[in-house]
Amino acid sequence: MESSRSKKARNAKKRTVKRGKKPDNLDQIDNGIESDNDSIVSSSSTVLSDENDRNAAQAVDEIGDDIEQVLIDNLDSATAKSAKERQASLKEIKRVLSKKFISDFINDRKDTVLDISEKLLKRGQAGDKAAAAALGSLLCIQLGASSSLHVYQTLKPLLITVMNDPSQAMAARSSCASALGMCCFIGSEELEEVIECMKALRDLFTKAVKEISANGGVMSAAVLAWGLLLTVASESAQEEAIENTIDKLYRLLENGDLNLRLSTGEVIALIYETGRGIDDGFDGYVDGLHDLLKDLATDSSKFRAKREKKQQKLIFRDILKTVELGIAPSDTVKFGSEKVCLDSWIRIRQYNALKEYLGAGTTSHLQENFLLREIFHLGPPVIKQDLSSKETRWEKALHNAAAEKERTKIRSRGRENKRAAAAHGF
């Protein structure tokens, strides 16, 4: 009996081990816990991603002294044969240039960056061309007005060719239209250049009216780029451009593309603000325009999404106030001890155009970039306080503790003196 019982016990033990092998040591147990925790970490990744987004503006600062080497390495591989490697390098270059103002470093390598942008606009794939156009704009933003003329002159014909080519991808055409506006805004020195680019952009968003569904993004980019150049044109050029364009913009408001409607509405408000700056009696009359703007500001169509209607109403109410009452929206962007007041459609258009390229790095560029500080009348950069000279939290705590100890000693001596005086009858 004893032997049969022991045999059953051994067999039961074997079955237990087979079903789930017992760990031989604590390391295996720890490994099992870690594998379980992997699912917990992955489930919380969406929460962590929000924190990562908030810290995006500091991402390049963490590169520290290696930032120049990072750029050199990515510039070398920006024209690699592998499309994946090429796009990754272009993305990294754009990220660094948007986050950090490094004009001295870029000025020494501007020909290299320009050559990359030029080659990819000529022979690159759709993604390459979109990235190359944005890279050209960022190069101009880094170099400033005085050093961007050659960049603009080199890229202008290529940008116009790609944006007008219906066989190109919409992302590439949109990026080229935006880049044409930005490069001309910064780099052109002659009024004729501004007029020529405005005409090219107007032709793009007027000729494709019948194909809005397929070209909405391209037309929206062209409208906003045209509006950006309107802010720097001469008064005579502005008058002519407004007269030749406002009725065409009216037709774009009637289409079903939300982004195109919003872009067009913003530029119409910019037109009214600019027109009244030239002539107080400007009314920009287009039959049916005011009624259409009112409809868009109070749209309750059931076929539009709720979020879309809310966004449209919010923006078109500001547009309608400008058209009817001459009142522009006002906002303030604060950074450090400084601020930029966006109290006109002109400033709003210029700020939004720059922010499109700089993203989370806009604040850093407002603080340090001479071009942006000149555009928004901020004056020379404010000298930053040396953070290394500040006390750390631990040093403050020690300092406060020592001060409190000294105050306690003084109060104790004071009480002892009072008691001594009372004892002697003083």
Image: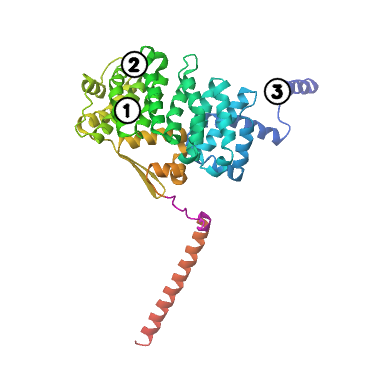
Q: How many other residues sit within 10 Å of disc 2, few (<14), some (14-19) or many (≥20)?
A: few
Camera-side residue of 62 and 350: 350
Horizontal and vertical percent position of residue 421: 37, 84
Q: Tag 2 or tag 3, which sits nearer the N-term?
A: 3
Tell whether position 83 is magenta: no
Q: Which residues are magenta?
A: 380-392
Residue 199 in sight here = yes
Colour style of the rendered protein structure:
rainbow
Camera-side residue of 403 and 297: 297
- Residue depth check, mark 3 versus mark 2: number of the one nearer the observer: 2
For the residues labelled 3 and 2, the Cα–Cα distance comes to: 67 Å
Q: Secondary structure at mark 2?
A: loop
Q: Tag 2 or tag 1, which sits nearer the N-term?
A: 2
Please, what is the three-letter code of the amino acid marked with disc 1? Val
Is 65 above or below relative to 10? below
Q: Secondary structure at mark 1?
A: helix
Is 402 above or below relative to 262? below
Residue 55 in sight here = no
Tell whether position 386 is magenta: yes
Please, what is the three-letter code of the amino acid marked with disc 2? Gly
Looking at the rendered structure, which numbered label has been put on residue 363? none
Looking at the rendered structure, which numbered label has been put on residue 16? 3
Camera-side residue of 412 and 75: 75
Q: Main secondary structure of the magenta part?
A: loop
**Residue for point 21% across, 21% down:** 291
Quarter-of-image position of residue 414: bottom left
- Residue labelled with disc 2: 256
